[in-house]
Image (tube, grey):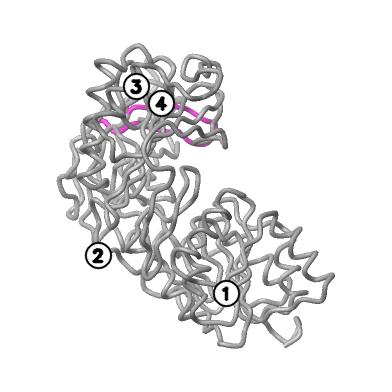
Amino acid sequence: MLTPLSQRALQEGEQIELTIDSLGYGGVGVGRHASGLVCFVGKTLPGERVTARILRRKKRHAVCGLQAVLKPAAERVEPPCVYFSECGGCHYQQLPYAEQLQVKMRILQDNFSRLALPTKELIEPIVGATTALGYRNKSFLHVEQQQIGFVNPLNKSIVPIERCLCAPDTTNQLIASVQEWLRGAGKILTEHLLDIIIRDSETNQQQMIIFVVASESRRLFLSSDKSKIPPAMHSLTEKHPEVSFYLNFKPRQSKSMFTDDFIHIAGSRALNETIGRVTLTLSPGSFVQIHPQQAAALYDRAIHELQPKQDEVVYDLYSGSGALSLLLAGQCREVYAIEQNYQAVLDAQQSAKLNQIENVVFRSGKCETILKKRLRHGHRAVAATINPPRSGCSATIPSLLQQLGVQRLIYISCSPPTLCRDIERLSEQGYRLKKIIPFDMFPQTYHLELIAYFFGTKSNGY
C-alpha cells in the first residue's frame, strides 16, 4: 500500500503543490506543505497556489524552485524582464512598483517586531525611487563558456543575458560589446575570466570595465613589467577608447567580489560619479551607492535629521568614498571621516579637491582604532554618522561613541537584521532610537537602505 504524500518525508527532486502564506526577508514566498514542511519558493506572492520542485531538503524546511503558478495573486503582473524566472538579480518584478514598496514595509516591520520598541510609530513611510529601472551605476556579471550573465540562485548556473533592465542603456551597450568580443577575439581568454564589473556614470558619461581574472592566470594577462596585455584584449580596448579598463586578480574559489589587486590597462584611471551637489572621483574598488539619485535623497535626509551646526565637528565613520562627508561639510565647522580602505580615502581626498571643499579630514584605518586614539588626545564630538558594511559596525563602536560624547547619531544601514543587533548594542550605551526612515535604494529587489536616528540620554552624559 502506498503511503500518502502528506504522511511521508518529502525528498529532493519531488514536485509538490502548496499555497504561499507570506513573503519572508530575502524576497521568497513562505508556505507550508500538507506534510507540515515549511517551503521557501522564490518569485511567488501571498495567497498564490503553486507547484514547486524541492531543490534542497533540510530537517525543518525546504528550498524550492517555482514550477507554475496555478492560482495567481490579484496583484501579480507580467515581469518586464525575460530573465526574471531564472535570474537571481531581481525578486519583485512580478509586483507593480507601488506594491513592492508596501511589501518591503511589511517585511521591515516584521524584522523589528522582536525588539521591545513601538515599531509602527518609529518606522516612517518608505521613500520610493523616482526611477525603478535603469538605475544601477554598477553591474556585476559572471563569465562562463563565452557567456556573461547573472547567477541562478537555485542551481548556481549562469543565466546568459543580452541586457539588464535595471542597468542604463550605456551599460547594456557595453554588455553587448563584451559579449561579442568573448565570442570572437576574447574567446581564448574566457576560461581565465571569472567576472566582469561595469561601472557607469550616466551624469558624467563615463564608464569603467573591470575584468576579474583567476590569480593563477596572471602571467597570461601581464608581461613582467605590466606594460603589455594579451593581444586578444586590444580589439576591445581600441573599440572603446572612452572607457576605463582594469584587470583584477583573485583566487578562483574566493567569494569576494574582487581583491585589492587592480591593474590599469587602458583609458582613464578613475571615474567621476555625481551624488547630489558633489562629484566623486572613484577608483575601481571604491564604494558608492548603486542608485545615484536615490543616494542624493538619502544623504539629504540624513543631514536634515542630524541637524549639524556650524560650530560642530561631525564624525563620519565608515566614510567610504566620502559622499556623505563632502555633503556634510557645508553644514558644520569640520567633518572628521574614517575609512579602512586606503584607496577610498585617497579618492575622497581627490574628490574634496575637485569640489573645492577644505574642511573635511579623511583618515585611513579601523574606526575603533582611530577613535581610541582621538579619545586619548581629548577629542570630543556631539554629532556623528555611521555607514557600515552589511556586517554592521564593530562591537566596540557604540561604547566609543558614548565616550566621545556623541549626542546625535545617524546610522545608515543596508541590512535590517544587522541594524536590529546594533540598535540593542547602542541602547546598552544609553542611545535611544527616535526614528527609522526606509529608502528603496534597490528597486525590483528585496534590499532596503535605512536611516536610523539615535539621541543620547542622560545616562551617557546628557
Report the residue marked by disc 3: 233
Residue 441 is left or right of residue 131, and the answer is right
Of mark 2 and mark 1, the one earlier in the sequence is 2
Image quadrant where residue 317 sits: bottom right
Of mark 4 and mark 2, the one earlier in the sequence is 2
Report the residue marked by disc 4: 156
Of mark 3 and mark 2, the one earlier in the sequence is 2
Residue 144: x and y in percent read 36, 20
Quote the CA–CA distance across marks 2 and 1.
32 Å
20, 406: nearer the viewer: 406
Residue 28: x and y in percent read 37, 44
Of mark 4 and mark 3, the one earlier in the sequence is 4
Name the secondary structure under disc 2: loop
Identify the magenta region: 53-67
Residue 304 is left or right of residue 316, and the answer is left
196, 85: nearer the viewer: 196
The local crowd at label 1, few if under 14, some if 14 to 19, many if 20 or more residues have their Cα within 10 Å, is some
Report the residue marked by disc 2: 130
Quote the CA–CA distance across marks 4 and 1.
47 Å
Residue 264: x and y in percent read 46, 34
Q: Does 211 sit above or below residue 242? A: above
Instruction: Kindly indicate whether the residue at mark 3 contacts the one at mark 4 (C-beta within 8 angstroms).
Output: no
Main SS category, magenta section: strand
Name the secondary structure under disc 1: loop
64 magenta-colored: yes
The local crowd at label 4, few if under 14, some if 14 to 19, many if 20 or more residues have their Cα within 10 Å, is few
The local crowd at label 3, few if under 14, some if 14 to 19, many if 20 or more residues have their Cα within 10 Å, is some
